[in-house]
Amino acid sequence: MAKKLLASVMAFALCQFMLATDMIVKQKNGEIKKFNVEDVEEVIFNENSNIPNDSTVVDASESPLNFSIKPDSTVEVTGVNKDSESIEIPSKVKIDGKVYTVNSIKYSAFSWKRSLTTLEIPSSITSIAESSVFSGSSKLKSINVASDNPNYSSVDGVLYNKDKTKIICVPGGIRGDFTIPSSVNCIGYSAFEDDSLTSVKIPSSVTKIGIYAFCGCRIMKSIDIPASVTEIEDGAFARCSNMTNINIASDNPNFITVDGVLYNKDTTELISVPAGIEGKFVVPSTVTSIRGWSFWGSGLDLINVPSSVTNIGDGAFWNCMNIVIDNSSKNVTTGEYTFTNCFSVRFTKNTPVVAGNPDLSVVMDTSDIRAVIFKTLSDSTAEVSHYRGAIDSFYIPAKIRIDGKIYTVTEIANGAFYIVGGGSLEGIKLPSTITSIGEEAFEWCEMESIEIPSSVTSIGEKAFSYCQNLRSVKIPSNVTSIGNGAFQCCWYLDIVIDNSKDNVKVGEDVFGGCKSVTWLKE
């Protein structure tokens, strides 16, 4: 009889789920309760009166992790909110009373966590963003993945994809020599970034080395690349401050090294100059293209670029000293962040280098400005393209003169003042002609305040993130768009927004970690 009754109750409940938006429960005492079906995750029939606890559910307020609800009603780990030596990612998390499945880890979520030593990843995690997720976490020794995870695995604390054909992360706390298993054919994005390993042995099974794969490996002095490697992505060996030699097997079909410097086989593309090489470097005249991030963090005093070069990639000379580019015979195309934080950049023709004057009404000639580089956007407008780190505090003019023609400065480009690890920029005055502040434009800068002109309409993603000296910012009423993480981790910042929430499109984690946020309008 009990079994029949139980079946009847289950059938009734099922019908309610299928045919109605509410579930009605009549108790033995006659009391009737109504539940919205969308709020009901599971109906449990139990002979005793105790409601069983789900040990896999962790309340978000009790976790050292930050979470974000995604459009598909799953949850992503976005960061860490307090120092912890050991962190276990929950498979389910309760946010505002509702239970969500945790299935992904966002880029940089565990980067620069100096206390973290151990991380436990559950079977529910099916996506890990391969973008410096663990970089800079120098004490992290072990990433352990649940054995039933469908997409990932771990061996001795090292993170791999499920079948161990791709190495995803060697934690920064692992020391000494490391041998990549012979099952691996791909070294992933940032897999060894900021590690303190003495050496890494790459087996002949590896065919690809990903973006920033060994970036910031400050102890390694050299690395041997086997003939099997046919693809090396940008910045793979950038910022390796002690590395002086990238050795390529002589029978490698795609790459060659000359005096420790990595090129494509016919030396028309310069791919990477080890950051430990010092003195003066002359780019060979066979080179027509310089790969992105190729000199990033270089210890060279002077770099001469010949007239054969027509293209220079993103971030190629980031944090370099003195660069002379011979563009006398043809134009040179540059990418984003190409000259960020360079001490001196000189083109032999039409030098587009500029910066600061307190009288914003004065038209400044680019030859008189030392701190930043401008780039023309149209026949009448220009953007602040790159900061050269030459001056700590200065003014940007509203109008500039390039080759005798006057341009109005309307934009701050993506990453224009962004400097890894904190920059020297302490103060800047923007003109009233600026309408757009780009992505990562001032990230990590040291300034305590900035006045955003009323002409600005948009602030890009992470534009001011990690500006940890900022104390106060007022966002004017014309700003209608603020990108993801624009003011994230500005711990002491009080923000006042001259608008209402309904009038401004605000991305994710825009004010995460800020001291206070005030909207002036309802």
Image (cartoon, helix red, strand yellow):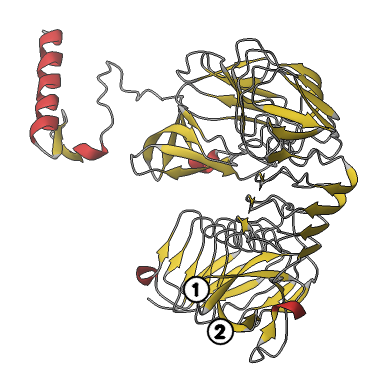
Q: Is residue 518 left or right of residue 401?
A: left
Q: Position of residue 240 (x, y in %)?
A: 79, 38
Q: Residue at x 71, y 36 (%)?
A: 267
* Quadrant of image for the N terminus: top left
- Residue 312 lies, with reference to residue 486, above or below; the image says above
Instruction: Name the image quarter holding residue 375.
Output: bottom right
* Quadrant of image for the C terminus: bottom left
Q: Position of residue 475 (x, y in %)?
A: 52, 75
Task: Give the residue number, with chain letter if any, for mark 1.
Answer: 378
Question: Tag 2 or tag 1, which sits nearer the N-term?
Answer: 1
Q: Residue at x 62, y 35 (%)?
A: 233
Instruction: Name the image quarter holding residue 465.
Output: bottom right
- The local crowd at label 1, few if under 14, some if 14 to 19, many if 20 or more residues have their Cα within 10 Å, is few
Dot label at residue 432? 2
Q: SS for tag 2?
A: loop
Instruction: Name the image quarter holding residue 126.
Output: top left
Q: Is residue 391 left or right of residue 65?
A: right
Q: Is residue 113 visible?
A: no
For badge 2, the amino acid type reads Ser
Q: Position of residue 392 (x, y in %)?
A: 79, 71
Q: Is residue 485 visible?
A: yes
Dot label at residue 337? none
Q: Position of residue 9 (x, y in %)?
A: 13, 21
- Residue 3 lies, with reference to residue 206, above or below; the image says above
- Residue 294 lies, with reference to residue 149, above or below; the image says below
